[in-house]
Amino acid sequence: MLQLLGFLCESFPGAMYQRSSQLLQIFLDSLNKQFKSEKPDMKIISGGIQGLCSLLVHFEHNFLEGTTSWQALDKSLAVLTVFGFPA
């Protein structure tokens, strides 16, 4: 579902513009919740990261405006490194 939302943002930016900030928060919240979980769901993490990448194609300004977004990304990269993914 998260990957689909990202795909819609990338493919139809005009239609998704009004919801881009809300979608950014959904992606970051979903990733944060999984990273704090004792048993993270890698499918949700994968969908969240792919969706976030797709959203950032057209709506990077939303991400760059908030310092909490940068902090969330930094935390996400740190957790991914723990799981064995290169940062």
Image (spheres, rainbow, N blue to C red):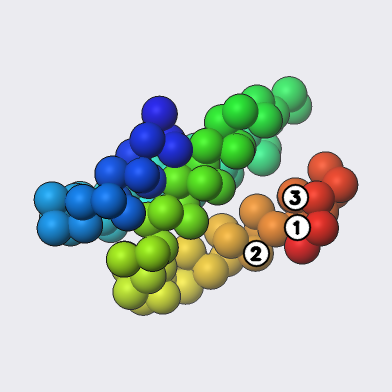
Q: Position of residue 55 (x, y in %)?
A: 37, 56
Q: Which mark is residue 78?
A: 1
Residue at 61 percent of width and 28 percent of height: 43
Residue density around tag 2, few if under 14, some if 14–19, many if 20 or more, within 10 Å = few
Q: Classify the position of the N terminus by image quarter.
A: top left
Read off the residue under disc 3.
Answer: 79
Q: Position of residue 28 (x, y in %)?
A: 48, 49
Cα separation between marks 1 and 2: 6 Å
Image x and y of residue 48, in percent: 51, 41
The amino acid type of the residue labelled 1 equals: Ala
- Is 39 left or right of 84, judged from the image as shown? left
Is residue 23 visible in the rendered image? The answer is yes
Q: Which residue is mark 2?
A: 74
> Image quarter for residue 87?
bottom right
Name the element at disc 3: helix
SS category of the residue bearing label 1: helix
Alpha carbons under labels 3 and 1: distance apart = 4 Å
Q: What kind of residue is marked 2?
A: Asp
Along the viewing direction, whichever of 52 and 12 lies nearer the viewer: 12
